[in-house]
Image (cartoon, rainbow, N blue to C red):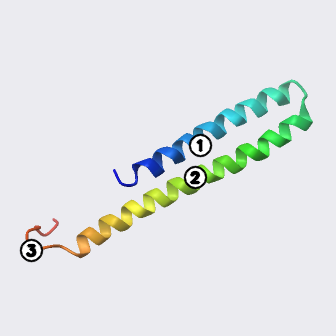
């Protein structure tokens, strides 16, 4: 679970951004257009940060698995 915290924080940021988008929708229905744009930009940045964290966590996990396969010790068996 080396990369689990990074992946979990990415999902939490995406969830927080989704709550921001719901708030933007409710503000748009109430015709609060000036307030809506500020929160929309913040939610977009938070969403983008969550996606980046997920990409980094998945890439790090794949690289670690590739390195584990590349450098096998004598006690390890060949992968099937």
Q: Is residue 4 left or right of residue 9?
A: left
Q: Classify mark 2: helix, strand or loop.
A: helix
Q: Which mark is residue 74?
A: 3
Which comes sooner in the sequence, label 3 or label 2? 2
In the image, residue 29 above or below residue 9? above
Asked if marks 3 and 2 touch (Cβ < 8 Å), the reply is no
Vertical position of residue 26 compared to residue 46: above or below = above
Measured Cα–Cα span from mark 1 to mark 3: 43 Å
Distance Cα–Cα, label 2 vs label 1: 7 Å
Q: Is 21 situated left or right of 7 in this image? A: right
Is residue 79 placed above or below 50 in the rendered structure? below
Q: Secondary structure at mark 1?
A: helix
Which residue is pictured at 52% across the width and 43% down the height?
Answer: 11
**Mark 2 and 1 residues: CB-CB less than 8 Å, in contact?**
yes
Sequence-wise, the earlier of marks 1 and 3 is: 1
Q: Position of residue 36 (x, y in %)?
A: 84, 36
Question: In percent of the image, x 40 and y 49: which residue is there?
Answer: 4
Front position in the image: 80 or 18: 18
Q: Residues within 10 Å of mark 3 (few under 14, many from 20)?
A: few
Disc 3 on helix, strand or loop? loop
* Mark-to-mark CA distance, 3 and 2: 39 Å
Tell me the number on the disc at residue 51. 2
Residue appearing at x 57%, y 57% in the figure: 52
Q: Kindly give the residue lying farthest to the left in the view shown.
A: 75
State the residue position of label 1. Answer: 14
């Amino acid at each position: 679970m080396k990369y689990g915290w990074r992946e979990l924080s990415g999902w939490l940021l995406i969830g927080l951004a989704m709550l921001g988008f719901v708030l933007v929708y409710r503000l748009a229905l109430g015709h609060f257009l000036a307030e809506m744009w500020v929160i929309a930009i913040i939610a977009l940045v938070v969403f983008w940060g969550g996606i980046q964290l997920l990409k980094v966590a998945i890439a790090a996990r794949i690289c670690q698995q590739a390195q584990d396969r590349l450098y096998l010790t004598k006690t390890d068996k060949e992968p099937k």
